[in-house]
Image (cartoon, rainbow, N blue to C red):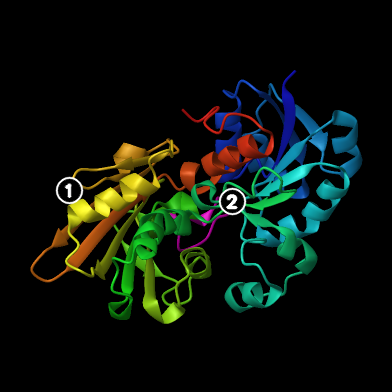
Amino acid sequence: MRRKVAIVGYTGYSGAELVRILQHHSQVEVVLLDHREDGGQGAALRKPKDLQHLPCDPESLRRAGVELVFLATPPAVSMELAPGMLQAGARVVDLSGAFRLGTAENYSAWYREPHTQPKLLAEAVYGLPEFCRERIPGARLVANPGCYPTAANLAIRPLLEAGVVDRAAGIVCDAKSGVSGAGRKPSLTTGFCEVTENFSAYSILKHRHVPEVLQVSSLAEREFSFTAQLLPVDRGILETIYFRTTGGAGAEDLLRIYEARYADEPFLRLYNPGRMPDLRAVARTNFCDIGATVDSSTGRAVVVSAIDNLVKGAAGQAIQNMNLMLGLAETEGLL
């Protein structure tokens, strides 16, 4: 028997990616939940015709036997829907930022709006499997990480834990993303004429993904500088991370640290010293690719981390979390 899972927000980029991947998953049956945000002429053109559609309400979930719901919705909608889904007995993987930051105060500081479900926020488990795997299987509510923090934390945290980063010198993360990271809702800044043949920075010093890096990698805000930039491509994130090493650590040392930390991780790929990943290598995959180089005379280090923002940065990682929550092979549907 296949396990029933449902998607709210299936017409958005991350939701559509969930549909695409899950249709090739051997252990689940996909149900689409029709929410008011899915209405309209544009959405009707994108509805998969061969999947079951249900009203987005708790009673429909109960009758259909849905075990898990993906919320590919804005934070406010996730906060509205999650309590009813949980009360219906379904578990939830939320792809928005609604439940990532631990406290209502932290959420309000970075998202500039109040949090309406502080009890659920305190309960939610952060879903970066490489660092939080032990807590995910037993969770009712998993907060799927943001795309930028996924690439950043996978590159930074092992080196901080190993003590090879000069924290006093700080870490600079220069991050570039494809336009799909901004979502499907039209806006002036993501329109074709604004993006094509262009390259721009945004949300400087106030990007809402910064606190996820701080809390997962145990950094103080003064130690971490982050700038997000918009690439004229549809998908992909490439982060170039600059810092200084301690104790004369070279590129081989950094890669040995990664190899030890990620030896059993199916979705981490490391490059030889001096070789760096690019967007093409990770497109439409759930991999995070990491390369490192170090100038031995100055201790200056550069690490490049690349992911597909819609897969490892959103839908793929959400399915990774679903697999863990349902007791399935973590790689099912993703390799």
Residue 164 magenta: no
Q: Up-down: is 78 above or below 119?
A: above
Please give left or right for residue 214 compared with residue 111 in the image.
left
Q: Within 10 Å of the Cα at label 1, are there few (<14), some (14-19), or many (20+) other Cα atoms? A: some
- Which one is nearer the viewer's eye here, 83 or 259? 259
Q: Is residue 125 visible?
A: yes
Q: Residue 332 placed where, x, y %?
A: 55, 27
Q: Residue 264, located in which quarter of the rendered image?
A: top left
Please give left or right for residue 38 compared with residue 291 in the image.
right
Q: Amino acid at mark 1?
A: Pro
Q: Up-down: is 214 above or below 195?
A: below
Question: Which callout, 1 or 2, points at the residue further toward the start of the chain?
Answer: 2
Residue 187 magenta: yes
Residue of label 2: 127
| Range of residues picked out in magenta | 182-191
Q: Residue 164 placed where, x, y %?
A: 28, 65
Q: Amino acid at mark 2?
A: Gly
Residue of label 1: 273
- Which residue is at a point 46% across and 54% down the rendered structure image? 150
Q: Residue 111, located in which quarter of the rendered image?
A: bottom right
Measured Cα–Cα span from mark 1 to mark 2: 30 Å
Please give left or right for residue 299 compared with residue 210 in the image.
left
- Which one is nearer the viewer's eye here, 230 or 302? 302
Q: Is residue 233 visible?
A: no
